Amino acid sequence: MIKENFNAIKEKLSDDVNIIVVTKYHTVEETLEAYEAGVRDFGENRIEGFLEKREALPEDANVHFIGTLQSRKVKDIAGSMTHLHSLDRESVAKKIEQYAEHEVKCFVQVNVSKESSKHGLSADEVQPFLEKLSSYGKVRVIGLMTMAPLTEDEEVLNDTFGRLKELRDELQESYPEITELSMGMSNDYEIALDHGATYIRIGSKIMGSR
Ligand SMILES: *Cc1c(COP(=O)(O)O)cnc(C)c1O
């Protein structure tokens, strides 16, 4: 089923869109099944899951860290983290600088919907944050990430994804290297794609629900 689910979504995408398959609720065995089906980008939101899947997967797979990362935990994964989707604090960037041996591709997480339960910077905090990061050598910001509210209200979803895209477009004037948009999950990825998502993060629609 994983293969069919993955292909069904992949078929709908243009070549510039990357699917991150989120394996956080699934076993190593199921994750390897996804690899066999052709998945090369995986997403994990906890340190333990990240390390377990990283160790099990072949070298040519990327494991993206998509969850909240505490700065004191950065050193545990800095050696093997290639992509971080939740950067919103300088303390985390400092630890990446200290512990990573290679560049880490980062997305700044933005709390577009301003839900208090969500992590991320508000839209107007992003530019000052990028200025602070400009002197960092290992932290390479390539895009913005957001999580939409848990809703089926298309107006809210359109508004959220549309605003992240607008913010990216504005920032590109000063930061041309910020090209990517990590947005869209199982229930809202089609709307995210309408607004130019370049990384969608899909768990249950591919791996099955838990
Ligand atoms: C779990 C998770 C996803 C995937 O969620 P699904 O609804 O299962 O597709 C995407 N992004 C983040 C940050 C997540 O924690």
Image: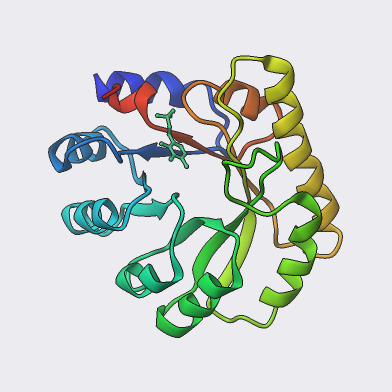
* Residue sitting farthest toward the front: 116
Q: Where is the C terminus found, in terms of image quarters?
A: top left
Residue positioned most to the left: 29
Percent across and percent down for residue 136 are: 61, 80
Indicate which quadrant contains ligand 1.
top left
Residue at far top of view: 153
Identify whether 146 is placed above or below 59. Answer: above
Q: Is residue 190 left or right of residue 169?
A: left
Residue 9 in the image: above or below residue 111: above
What residue is at 66 percent from the left and 45 percent from the top? 111
Total marks placed: 0
Q: Is residue 45 above or below residue 173?
A: above
Q: Which is more toward the observer, 166 or 45?
A: 45
Colour basis: rainbow
Give percent across and percent down for residue 173.
86, 59
Task: Name the residue located 16 percent from the left edge and 53 percent from the top edge.
Answer: 56
Question: Based on the displayed image, in which of its 4 quarters is residue 112 positioned?
Answer: top right
Q: Position of residue 76 (x, y in %)?
A: 30, 71
- State which quadrant residue 160 falls in: top right
In-front residue for pair 113/174: 113
The quarter of the picture where the N terminus appears is top left
Closer to the camera in the image, 204 or 72: 72
Above or below: residue 140 compared with residue 8: below
User: Is 109 left or right of 71, judged from the image as shown?
Assistant: right
The image quarter in which residue 183 lies: top right
User: Residue at coordinates 66% horizontally, 15% vertically from top-left?
Assistant: 153
Q: Tell me the residue at 70%/36% (across/down).
A: 113
